[in-house]
Image: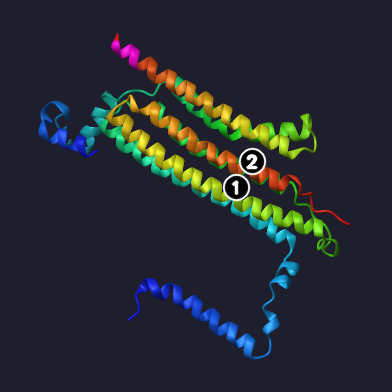
Amino acid sequence: MLSSYGSSYSYPALAAIVIGSYILFTGDGEYFNVGKFLEETSPYSWAAAGIGLCIGLSVIGAAWGIFVTGSSILGGGVRAPRIRTKNLISIIFCEVVAIYGVIICIVFSSKITSIPTQDLYHPENFYTGYALFWGGLTVGACNLICGVAVGITGSTAALADAADQTLFVKILVVEIFGGVLGLFGLIIGLLVSGKATEFQRH
Amino acid sequence: MATRRVKSTEKPSDDAAPAAPVLPKGMQAEKMRANPGPAIPAEVLVKLFGFTAAMLIAPIGCYYLSTNVLFPGSTVTGASIAAVVANVVLIAFVVVAMREDDGEESKKNK
């Protein structure tokens, strides 16, 4: 009997082998063509996927941090009601992570303009599409991990503050270092997309 | 957390308040009306909504101000300014929160 862990990975692999063998042995081997896929995929879809990944992953990170921190603040606040405004700092650190994603998405979406299809498949438009996709993925992944880091640190800060209030400032320093990580992703995302022009006719 | 739980089981009398008797619904409402608990000060609400609005509006507003008025066409500058403004709001909240909690503690010590 297959374990559920093994079967969850073996079914997609089996399907890929069957479909790949069918294409290969029926004389359609050239149907699997990475270059054709890259050439025929619209730069609009790369750009839109990048923007969606950027804001989506950023919000997942921020929300994850906020719910971890928020539940710890409530739990600590029941035992030690004096922990209040200071611990909301952790929440607002998580919120900033989502704001970074929103800023990058606004910058990226200003590069999407409507042009006719026959002018779309041009090297500069391809560059814009790829830059927005990978830039958005960079920013989104950075903000996801940054939000989780700030959230878990913030939750620990709330519990430590409930036990001993001299600990809060020390953990806040760790939290600030975690919060700066999202800023690195934002800078790189801006640099990657900075050279990309708007979609334009040639 | 574990240490706190142990502490409360060792000497439950001075740490935990005696459990309030469960009142019927009507009496609970009567008690709530007589003693509605600590009121939320207006300045706390103003601070809360002020910082919420500032976090939502200030960075994005500064981005549009920068790209449309100050440096037209340069989105990277606008985005950098927006990121800086978001951090300024964050630092302002840290300062306000620290000052508020320290003030309450010193008031209690007097």
Q: Residue at x 27, y 24 (%)?
A: B35
Q: Overall secondary structure of the magenta stretch?
A: helix
Q: Is residue A113 left or right of residue A63?
A: right
Q: Residue at x 22, y 38 (%)?
A: B25
Is residue B107 covered in magenta? yes
In the image, residue B89 above or below residue A14:
above
Query: Can you tell which mark lies on residue A139?
Result: 1
Instruction: Give the amino acid at mark 1.
Output: Val
Q: Is residue A185 left or right of residue A163?
A: right
Q: Give me the chain letter of mark 1.
A: A
Q: Residue at x 73, y 44 (%)?
A: A194
Farthest residue to the bottom: give it: A26
* Image spot of residue A183 (x, y percent): 58, 38
**Disc 2, SS:** helix
Instruction: Give the amino acid at mark 2.
Output: Ile
| Range of residues picked out in magenta | B105-109
Let me know if residue B61 appears in the view: no
Q: Which residue carries the number 2 mark? A: A187
Q: Is residue A164 left or right of residue A144?
A: left
